[in-house]
Image: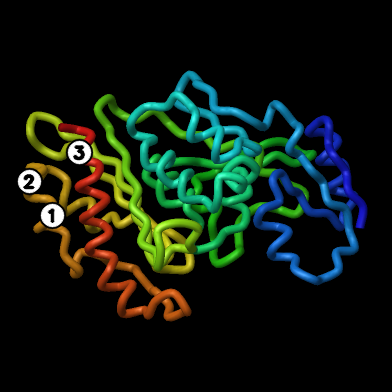
Amino acid sequence: MSYITATTLEDALTALTAGPASIIAGGTDWFPAQGDRHFDGTLIDISRLTDLRGVSRTDTGWRIGAATTWTDIIKADLPPAFNGLKLAAREVGSVQIQNTGTIAGNLCNASPAADGVPPLLTLDAGVELTSPHGTRQMPLHAFLQGVRKTDRAADEILTAIHIPDLPNGSMGSFVKLGARKYLVISICMVAVVLRVERGLVSDIRIAIGAASPVAQRLTTLEDALRGLPPGDLQNAVTGDLIHGLTPITDVRASADYRQTAATQVIRRAIALALEGTA
């Protein structure tokens, strides 16, 4: 194995196309996944590419560089709609992992239990992919195609996440259910972004993770809740409105438990978001 610390994006792309190669920034997912297996290729470290790190304002919203760490996100000055993303950032492993692990690594790892995915789905996030042939953008929900599977081509690097502006008054939240309080992989997790206007819920977005191969928006439930008074939301969240979940049974919980817990975690996340609108 050879190891390269890229100093420019062009250097990283050149090394990637020479292959076989893997991209890392923090490496907090790549190294544990590799285990004892031999890697006969080039490991390309992009953590020093300053253009790929940081949160910045754009004409139409926000740009988060691929190598931005979870600690960077926690410290960033962002609107209340991003509260769910910040809460999720605090759930990513230990403080040491938050200091090193990156948002793009979380997405490219494509775990069903990736903490960053549900809040980014509620923010209508898109990803930017760069190759020697140019740059393309696509919605996050299209980029994530299955367990450990994305739409990233072999010669592409995920270079940024783009989030469009949300209406003023939008409030985000994130609730994670696990077997213990800290350092835990989710049994179920939910992100919410909502907005209350003139005493009614004018916009609501709900995404759930660790309950299907890919985290997903619950659009049927969103449609049922939109337009209701905030006080009616809890009772309106019922299991028959939560479609598309295919939870598995593993060492953390049974499929039946995950299915049942989803309703309660959604209610908690909605309640947390409503606290910010009061």
In the image, residue 180 lies at what x, y percent?
40, 64
**Which of the 4 image quarters holds residue 123?**
top left
User: Is 276 placed above or below 157 here?
Assistant: above
Q: Residues under labels 3 and 2: Cα distance?
A: 12 Å
Indicate which disc residue 275 carries: 3
Crowding near the residue tagged with mark 2, few <14, some 14–19, many ≥20 C-alpha atoms within 10 Å: few
Note whether residue 269 is visible. Answer: yes
Give the quarter of the figure containing the N terminus: bottom right
Element at badge 3? helix
In the displayed structure, 250 sits above or below 181; it is below
Where does label 2 land, which residue? Answer: 231
Residue type, mark 2 in image? Gly
Closer to the camera, 242 or 185? Answer: 185
Q: Earlier in the sequence, mark 3 or mark 2?
A: 2
Residue 22, given in percent of the width and then of the height, sits at: 79, 53
Give the amino acid type for the residue marked by disc 3 in the picture.
Answer: Glu
Where residue 85 appears, x then y in whole percent?
Answer: 43, 41
Q: Quadrant of the C terminus?
A: top left
Classify mark 3: residues with Cα within 10 Å, few (<14), some (14-19) or many (20+): few
Describe residue 129's horizontal placement relative to residue 10 as left or right.
left
Camera-side mark, 3 or 2: 3
Q: Residue at x 76, y 33 (%)?
A: 48
Q: Is residue 244 left or right of 266 when viewed as pictured?
A: right
